[in-house]
Image: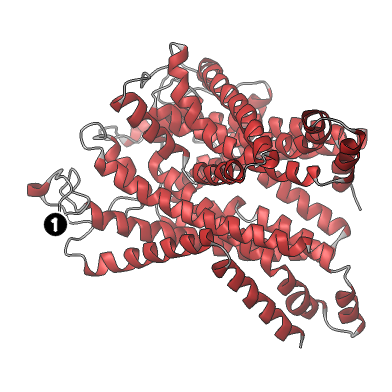
Amino acid sequence: MREEAGSVKMRSYMAQLTRGSRQASAGCIILGVWVLLAVLVPLFWPWSYSEQNAELQNQAMSLTHLFGTDKFGRDIFARVWYGAGISLLIGTASALINACVGILYGVAAGYAGKYADMAMMRIADVIASVPSMLYVILITLTAGAGAGSIILGLCVAGWIDMARIIRGEIQRLKETDFAAAARMEGLSPLRILWRHLLPNAAGSILVNLIFLVPQAIFTEAFLSFLGVGLAAPSASLGTIIQEARSQMLVYPSQMICPLLVLCVMLLALNAVGTVAERQLRRGKSL
Amino acid sequence: MPGYTFKRLATGLVSLLVLVTVTFFLVRLIPGSPFQNGGVSGRVVEAVEEEYGLNEALFDQYLTYMGNLVQGDLGVSYQEPGTTVAEIIGRTWPVTVSLGLIALLVAVVLGTGLGILRAVSKRRIVREGIAAGGMLLAGIPNFAAAILLLFVFSVKLGWFPSAGLLTPAHYVLPVLSLALYPTAVISRLMGNTLAVEMGKQYVLFARAKGLGRGRIIFTHALKNAWIPVLNYVGPASAFLLTGSFVVESIYTIPGLGREFVSSITNRDYTLILGLTVFMGTVVIAVNLATDLICAWMDPGMRRSYSDK
C-alpha cells in the first residue's frame, strides 16, 4: 500500500512538473531537442567532427556548413553537437555519481546521528571549505587530461550539497510516526531507510540532481576553456570555444555558435530545476 | 558563542591543513618533471632537480615545505628563476582583490535592491521580470559572459577598453562579468527570504501599528532577510576567485587568476602549489569570518552547529 501511494505521489509530482508550468515544459523540450541533435548529428551529418580539410578553412555560415568551418576546415555544426553530447555525458555521469555518493553519505550521517553524524558532517565541511575548482584543476593535471579525470575531479566535492540535504531530510523523517511504526514492526534499519524514508526524500533528491547537471557542465566547460579539460581529438563545448578564441575578432561566429548552444543548454537545465524546486517548496508548505 | 567560535576555528585550521597536504601531494604526483624540456639531457634535469630538493623522499619534501610554509616561505618559481612565489603573490593579489571586492559590492547592492523589488513590488511584471532575468543571468557561465561583453561593448561598440586595468573605465567590463552571477543569486535569495518574512506575524503587527511600508521593509524585515545573503558571501568569494582565472585572462589583467592560468600552462609546480594554497586560505578565511558574523547575528545558527 505504502509503495503504491509513494509511486502515485511521485507520478503526480512529475505530472505537475511537466504539465503545470510553461517554463518547465519549454526547458524539457529544449533539452530533448539538444539531446536528439547531440545523438543524431554525429551519426547522420555528412561532415565529421574531427576530419581536417585544408581547402575549407574558416568558411562562413552556409547551407552546407550551417555554422561554418574552423581554422582547420572542420565543420563547426558537427563539432558543436558532438561537443554538446560530450558535455551532457560528463554532466550527467558526474551528477549521478555525486548523487549516489551524497545520498549514501547523507543517509549514513542522518541515520547514525550523534558523534558519527558530527564527525561525518565536519569532514564534509572541511572538504567543502576549499573551492572545488582548485581540486578539479589539480586532479586533471595529475591524472592527465580526459573525461575520466574531469569526472573524478567533479566528484571530489560535488556530493556535499546532496549529502547535507539528505542528512537533513533523514533526520526529519526518522522522527515521524510512520518511521516509528516501521521500527516497532521490527523492520531492519536498511529496509526502513530504503523503503520508507528515502522515497519520501525523492523530491529533494530530484531537485538537487537536476541542479548538479548544469553545475558539472559548467565546471567542465570552464576547465576546457582554461585548457586543462579534454585532450585533443575529443572535444567539448568548452574546448571548441577555447579554440575559437584566438580568431575571435576575425571570425566571431566560430565562438558565438558553441557559446550560445552551451548557454541555452544550461538555461534549459536551470529552468527545469527552478520549477522543480518551486513545486517542491509548495508541496512542503501545504 | 565562545564554544562555537572555538569549534569553527578548529574546523578552519583542519581545512587549512588538509588543503595544504592534498595540494602538495597532488602537485608532486603530476607526471613528468617540471624541468623536462625538449633538448635538455637527463643529467641536467637530475642536477636541477637535486638543486631544488626534488630527489629527496616525498615525505621529507612535504615536511620541508610545511616548515617553510609556517615561516611564510612558499618557495621559488621554477619558470622565473630567482623570483619567489611570495613575490609573485604580493605583486598580483591587490589587483584581484580590488576587482573581487568591487564585484562583490556591486553584486550585494544590485542583488539586494532587485531582491527587495522582487519581493514587494505590486506589479506582476516587475516581479516575474526580475525572477526571469535572474535565472537567465545565472545560466550564463562567467567566461561566456566575459567574452560576450568584451565582444559587444569593446570590440563592436568600442565603449570600453578591452585590456589592462589603468582607468576606472577598464574596470567596468571585468567587474560586470564577475558580478553577474552573484547578483542573480543574491536577488533570488533576497527575494525568497524577504517574501517569507513579509508574511510573518511581526510584519503584520508593524503594519497594524501603522508603520509605513518602507519602514517595515528596511528596519524590520530586512534585518532578518539579510542573513542568507551574508551567508552567501563565503561561496561568492570562492566563485569570484575562480572567476578571476577566466576574466583576468580574457581581459589581460595582471592578477592572481591570470598568474594561476599561466602557471598551469607553464607547469610551474611551486607556483601552482603556492597560488592554490594562498587562494584556498583566503576562501577558508572568508568562510570562517562570514560564519562567525552570522552566528553572532543569529543564535539559531550556532545552536544548529553544536551537538544536538
Disc 1 marks a residue whose amino acid type is: Thr
Q: Nearer the viewer, residue B237 or B113?
A: B113
Residue A141: % across, % down? 45, 44
Q: Residue at x 74, y 71 (%)?
A: A200
Q: Quadrant of residue B224?
A: top right
Tally of numbered discs:
1
Q: Quadrant of residue A64?
A: bottom left
Q: Is residue B205 left or right of residue A65?
A: right
**For the view shown, which residue lies furthest in the left direction?**
A55
Q: Is residue B255 left or right of residue A201?
A: left
Q: Residue at x 17, y 54 (%)?
A: A65
**Does residue B58 appear anywhere in the picture?**
no
Residue B135: % across, % down? 54, 46
Residue at numbered disc 1: A64
Q: Nearer the viewer, residue A7 or B278?
A: A7
Residue A10: % across, % down? 65, 75
**For the view shown, which residue lies furthest in the top direction?**
B167
Q: Count residues near mark 1 (Cα–Cα under 10 Å), then give few for <14, some for 14-19, many for 20+.
A: few
Check disc 1 and report its element: helix, strand or loop: loop
Residue B302: % across, % down? 87, 41
Task: Relative to B170, say whether A150 is above or below.
Answer: below
Task: Relative to A155, say whether B44 is above or below.
Answer: above
Q: Quadrant of the N terminus of chain A?
A: bottom right
Q: Nearer the viewer, residue B253 or B138?
A: B138
What scheme was used to colour the molecule? secondary structure
Q: Quadrant of the C terminus of chain A?
A: bottom right
Q: Residue at x 61, y 69 (%)?
A: A16
Q: Residue at x 86, y 32 (%)?
A: B296
**Does residue A39 appear anywhere in the picture?**
yes
Task: Relative to A37, say whether B18 is above or below.
Answer: above
